Image (tube, grey):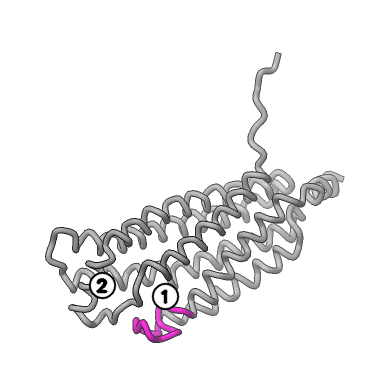
């Protein structure tokens, strides 16, 4: 007698995780707008120290919130890899690129969160050290900006290839992923744009959000929606490949 329980529905959980990524990212963005004041110039020691001191608990909460968001991303990329490889095992090495770069993206983001949380801890019960605050702030700006965009481009480009090659998801999600990868690469020069909070093209500034963050978010949500509804597409792709 076989008492083996069926495994979780990978397609459903991939979709749920993707939708969770979208909801959590949007919620975090709204919280940032509501709870945080505009960033001060980091070359102003007094303004930077005062800003971080007043927002210390909110910065720590954001770092904690991000751990749930990043956990959802891990579930998403794990499920995505399985969706592809169960139809096209020969694409496992490409899905490995997507999965590995996705995990590295999570790690870099966690490091950026740690830097941001460290700025908060540096002001709680302590006299703020402006030089430390500035170094940590610039470091997490690069992690959330150019470094993260490079990894996101690798994630989405490899995902685009395997989506189109396998037919596991609608082809338009693959073409959309190529577009997201291109936009993330387009945002890379912002690392040379300085750190002025008033500059749209500053490192980690508005250009990065519009060219990289939001397109990535839209793609993840689209993949999640497609995974939850396109069960026939997967069955068809499996039958076509087996034949």
Q: Nearer the viewer, residue 29 or 145?
A: 29
Q: Secondary structure at mark 2?
A: helix
Residue to which mark 2 is pinned: 51
Report which quarter residue 201 is drawn in.
Answer: bottom left
Most prominent secondary structure in the magenta stretch? loop
What separation in Å lies between label 2 and label 1 (alpha carbons)? 18 Å
Residue at x 59% of width, y 70% of height: 215
Assign a secondary structure to mark 1.
Answer: loop
In the rendering, which numbered label is found on residue 204? Answer: 1
Classify 8 as above or below 208.
above
**173 left or right, relative to 239:** left
The front one of 92 and 29 is: 29
Which residues, given as a range, are shown in magenta?
192-206
Q: Is 209 in front, or is 154?
A: 209
Count residues near mark 1 (Cα–Cα under 10 Å), then give few for <14, some for 14-19, many for 20+: many
Asked if residue 241 is positioned above or below residue 152 in the image, the reply reads above
Q: Is residue 193 magenta?
A: yes
Relative image position of residue 226 (x, y in whole percent): 71, 55
Residue drawn at the location 61% of the way across and 70% of the way down: 180
Q: Quadrant of residue 116?
A: bottom left
Q: Quadrant of the C terminus?
A: top right
Mark nearer the viewer, 2 or 1:
2
Quadrant of the image containing the N terminus: top right
Residue 158 image position (x, y, % from top left): 62, 61
Question: Label 2: few (<14), some or many (≥20) within 10 Å?
Answer: some
Place of residue 22 in the rendered image (x, y in percent of width and height, measured from the top left): 56, 59
Residue shown at the point (74%, 58%) measured from the top left: 165
Question: At 53% from the left edge and 65% from the top edge, which residue is drawn?
Answer: 152
> Where, by quadrant of the figure, is residue 123 drawn?
bottom left
Q: Residue furthest left?
A: 127
Residue 149 placement (x, y as % from top left): 49, 70
Q: Above or below — where is 134 with respect to 122?
A: below
């Amino acid at each position: 007698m076989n008492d083996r329980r069926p495994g979780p529905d990978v397609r459903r959980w991939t979709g749920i995780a993707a939708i969770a990524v979208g909801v959590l990212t949007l919620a975090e963005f709204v919280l940032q707008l509501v709870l945080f004041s505009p960033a001060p110039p980091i070359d102003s020691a007094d303004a930077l120290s005062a800003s971080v001191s007043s927002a210390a608990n909110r910065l720590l909460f954001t770092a904690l919130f991000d751990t749930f968001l990043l956990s959802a991303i891990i579930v998403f990329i794990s499920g995505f890899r399985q969706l592809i490889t169960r139809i096209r095992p020969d694409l496992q090495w490409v899905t490995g690129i997507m999965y590995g770069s996705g995990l590295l993206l999570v790690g870099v983001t966690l490091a950026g969160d740690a830097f941001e949380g460290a700025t908060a801890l540096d002001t709680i019960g302590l006299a703020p050290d402006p030089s430390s605050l500035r170094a940590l702030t610039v470091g997490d700006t690069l992690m959330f900006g150019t470094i993260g965009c490079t990894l996101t481009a690798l994630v989405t480009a490899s995902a685009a290839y395997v989506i189109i090659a396998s037919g596991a998801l609608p082809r338009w999600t693959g073409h959309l992923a190529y577009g997201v990868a291109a936009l993330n690469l387009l945002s890379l020069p912002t690392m040379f744009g300085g750190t002025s909070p008033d500059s749209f093209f500053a490192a980690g500034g508005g250009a990065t959000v519009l060219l990289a963050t939001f397109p990535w978010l839209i793609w993840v949500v689209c993949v999640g929606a497609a995974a939850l509804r396109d069960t026939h597409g997967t069955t068809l792709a499996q039958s076509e490949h087996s034949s």
